[in-house]
Image (cartoon, rainbow, N blue to C red):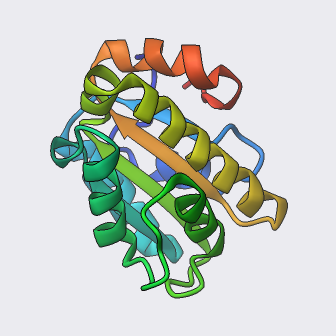
Amino acid sequence: MTDEPSGNVDAWGRHLRSTTTRCLHVARPGDSVVRGVTTTAKNLGMRVFLLDGSRIADKATLMEEVTRVIRAPEWFGQNWDALLDSLRDLSWVPADAYIILWTSADRLARDSPLDFETFVGVLIDAATRWRRSSVPFHIILLGDEALRGALRLVADEALCEH
């Protein structure tokens, strides 16, 4: 993984304010990325949803984690369509921009590739919708080198090359 903004607050800020750059980012695991992104987001009025990938092994555990993190409304049906609807709405957590920061994302890619592919597709669809409204929506996945390869197979057109 080359030249990601790592923990550099200014680099993340420039990148995450954009609605024109690609929405899907891969970074090496580490606290500096989490700190850099969350600090930048706080300073810029962005909302960060921190998904703990160590809790996510399949669709069921993914839905549980997403429900917890985005504080999904009661109507959330824990299925792919409801997830997409929720991520396109987010009216219960208003912000100037949204960031999904997914640690250990390589776990789902390895343990349940079909769920990984479907979830990434849902995230990209939600990002596309927000960006049409000029609202930045970025997805940052932290994981090993194999993660970038998995993303190239399922979402190359959305993958940002740092």
Nearest the eye: 16 or 93: 93
Task: Tell me: residue 142, above or below residue 132.
Answer: above
Give the quadrant of the C terminus: top right
Question: What is the residue that sits farthest to the right in this orientation?
Answer: 132
Determine the residue positioned at 36% across, 61% down. Answer: 66
Give the quadrant of the N terminus: top left
Task: Tell me: residue 136, above or below residue 147.
Answer: below
Q: Position of residue 117 (x, y in %)?
A: 50, 30
Horizontal arrangement in the rendering, residue 1 relative to residue 88 (left or right): left
Horizontal arrangement in the rendering, residue 114 relative to residue 82 (left or right): left
Q: Examine the image and state in which quarter residue 40 appears.
A: bottom left
Q: Is residue 2 visible?
A: no
Q: Position of residue 7 (x, y in %)?
A: 32, 43
Q: Position of residue 15 (x, y in %)?
A: 59, 46
Determine the residue positioned at 51% across, 22% down. Answer: 151
Q: Is residue 88 visible?
A: yes
Determine the residue positioned at 52% across, 61% down. Answer: 83
Horizontal arrangement in the rendering, residue 127 relative to residue 94 (left or right): right
Q: Position of residue 114 (x, y in %)?
A: 45, 27
Nearest the eye: 84 or 30: 84
Determine the residue positioned at 44% across, 73% down. Answer: 43
Task: Tell me: residue 85, above or below residue 124.
Answer: below
Q: Report the label total.
A: 0
